[in-house]
Image: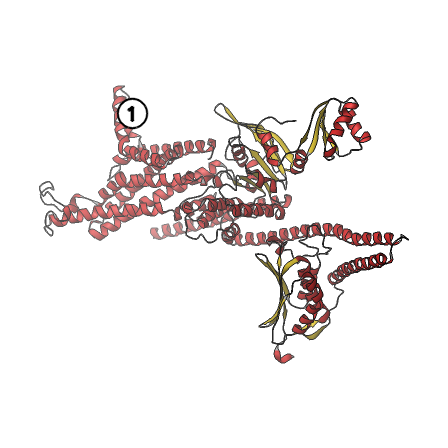
Amino acid sequence: MEYVLKTENITKVYGQHKVVNRVSMHVKKGAIYGFIGKNGAGKTTFMRMVAGLAAPTEGTMELFGSTELEKQRKRIGTLIENPGVYANMTARENLEVIRKNFGITEKQAVDDMLEFVGLSDTNKKKVKNFSMGMKQRLGIAISLFCNPDFLILDEPINGLDPEGIKEIRELLLKLNREKGITILISSHILGELSKIATHYGIIREGVLVEEFPASDLEDRCRRCHKLIVDNTELAANILENKLHINNFDVPKQGVIRVFDHFETMEQINREFILNGVNIKESYLSGQDLEGYFMELLGGGVND
Amino acid sequence: MINLFSGELYKLQKSKSIYICCITMIAFVLLLYGAFATAEKIQQGELENGSYGFEVDAEANHGGNSVWEEVSMLEVVQTMFVGIGGIISAIFISIFVFGEYANGAVKNVTGKGYSRWKIFSIKYIATILAALLMLIIMIVAVLIAEILFVGTGRFNSELFSNLVSYASMQLLLATAFGGIVIVINQFCRNLGAGIAISVCLIMFSTIITAGLDIALRYFELDIKASDYWIVDLINNCPLNEIDSAYATRAIISSIIWIIVTFIIGNVHFQKTDIK
Amino acid sequence: MQILLIGISLILVIVAGILSARLWCYKKQISHIKEELSFLETEESNYKLTSYCKIGKTEEVIQCINRLLAQDREEENRLKRENRVYRESITSISHDIRTPLTSAKGYLQMMQKETLPEEKRLEYIKIVERRLDNLTDMLNQLFEYARIEAGELKLEPEIINAGNVFAETISLFYEDFLKKDCEPQVHITENPCKINADKHAFVRIVENLIKNALVHGTGGYEFSLIKEKEHCIICVSNLTETVENQDIDQIFDRFYTTDKSRSRKTTGLGLAIVKRFAMQMCGDANANLKGKRFSIQVRLPVLAEKES
């Protein structure tokens, strides 16, 4: 079973509006999948459908390679939007309700989990008096309580202070590494996501525009001398044989990217022109993560 | 399923509202009995007319009969069921059902291996049972208050057999009414609206059915709406010797209302998106 | 008479009812457990068994099975982790061994030039010697560890004065601390601390602790040996820039090093050897990190006064 989650053309329509439009996502086992999109792009709705809170209007999905969704959902832990809590009970009581509902026999599990997320001193404090960070921790505790294999987290660091964010990041990495838990996490704090994500999925206005592993990202953002030419093969040949430059690639027809020798830009330009390659554009390119994502999220993909 | 039920039980145990509602009911019972006891004392001359704010009109009271002869225990039970009992159980049910949706706690159990109809059914059953328990506590409170204020003098087998049959009928009707309150709260996930609508039903729905009765008679149809509406049935339940006509109507209507609300609630829960 | 009969039949009915209810519960519970176990057989998962209803001792059985599952998974994870570390280490160690050799070879090649001035040649010879010494150290450590693991290293315990040996060993590193310009604070208890231990192993423990501190620590060295009830506790602590909280659990694992680039030529075995020796001598070693201060404590059982 390679994919923990595989959806095919999942669509959700509210009234006239297609909030989620034919999304086909693939989350590999053991991955930390960073789900990126602007507010209102459809991330939360999509995640709610995966979690079984909302029914898709169209499309199918497979969890852990099986279509028996209800059965497989026992293995999923979720934290979607606000954590689901009983405001008039304490953290311990909230977890106790979960424990009873799912027939978990170990009474110690509640205290262990509270300690794990750092809520063991809350005792009689009711959840309605919790700070946002504490509520978020409780939400994470709830999502982890049933020993899941797949975590679906919607903006889990929402409302946490920097130390809390670091703790959650370390916790997620630990869970992924030690227990092999696959994580689907949505956020619009790119910096944080980029520290832990192994794969990215970009959603824009309900459509999943791109899906790629993190290693690709580095590739796409690399600093390079970019040339748009009319004769790609000839240009490549010139680079290799005449200029002895090997560190370049051809992402698509008409585009050449040279990854070093930035000081020889003019020389490259000259050689191309002298040998009959017409240059439409020649510039230094390279983006940071944010720039790359902004491009994907905002306008079209510039290439 | 058993696990879900055990979860609901735990929630009920930990919810303050169930205790407050029970205490309120008991307080009302004691208040009623206290009022009657005071009136009796005034009647018998032990207390001055006007003490504790009570004034007893001796003539209106059939010339000085004991208060206790006018008011039987069953009548107290009736007052409780028809009035306060209904309102307080409706409030409790609303609070309990709303608590599920207020902060989205129901998210944790939905879509995690339990089918939606199981989840809803267990919640329905647990809520109704809690409400029934409250009403039974109310009846027990009346019994105890009777013993405290009047003593066991008025007890006899006839009283008890009437009490049992009346209480059973009322509890059945209360189940049906509870179902209606649950569905109302399920649809409008708003505590204020839920309570308001339920209480209004208790207070005013009989007017509507009366109006419907008139309309039906105008069209020369032989059925009365008020014969089948729960609140009417609760109000009209005979104290002594329930006649079979009424019994049949009440039992069948209750069962139908229970089934209808159960199904409507289930279907709604199936389709709805959980926030 | 009739009432008695009715009473008895009522009781029988109730008992029958309770018994059948319990039977139903047992059946449901067992089939639930079976379903979950067959699921766990086929799928690799973190899932733990749950209970359908509380009946008899079935919940205790479930808890036992869950504990077994946890042990199993823990073991699997440990193996995976160790395998990964092991593979990574083989790669790094071969690189570490190759580097000084290549460097030495490079210098040798340079020495073959006839035009090389004599002082340079002598200098290069010294460098080659140092490189080979370094290499020898690393290989020794590797072999020692391999022998400990294989159980080939037999300890020969004798009664030694821990405090004295500790002080002697520290003094061997005097020059190194001088070079680093960091004089360590040493505190050794006045009470004689006699332990029954293999002298070589004990010296090795102290050596490895100090070497570790020298190589990875940034300053603030504090070494102490104190006697606490029945144990002699050696504590080596220093300030560090590289150790983090998540390293503490693995610091005694073989081949583990916080020096990600392996630029300091360490095998990652020093502390593993410390722990092994400590445990073989019925003691223990643990590490903790408070802010920037990293410390390791080794405790060894002390001989009771009258026995010495």
In this view, the residue in front, A89 or B136, is: A89
Q: Residue at x 43, y 51 (%)?
A: C15
Q: Residue at x 63, y 52 (%)?
A: C74
Whole-percent x, y for residue A123 in the image: 43, 53
Residue extending furthest bottom?
C306
Q: Is residue A62 left or right of residue B143?
A: right
Q: Chain of mark 1?
A: B
Colour pattern = secondary structure
Q: Is residue C139 left or right of residue C296?
A: right
Q: Is residue B46 above or below residue A300?
A: below
Q: Residue at x 60, y 75 (%)?
A: C190
Marks counted in the figure total 1
In the rendered image, the quadrant that contains the C terminus of chain C is: bottom right
Q: Is residue C127 above or below residue C166?
A: above
Q: Is residue B7 above or below residue A35?
A: below
Whole-percent x, y for residue B29 in the image: 25, 46
**Can the viewer see residue C28 in this picture?**
no
Amino acid found under the numbered disc labelled 1 = Ile
What residue is pinned by disc 1? B223
Q: Quadrant of residue A36?
A: top right
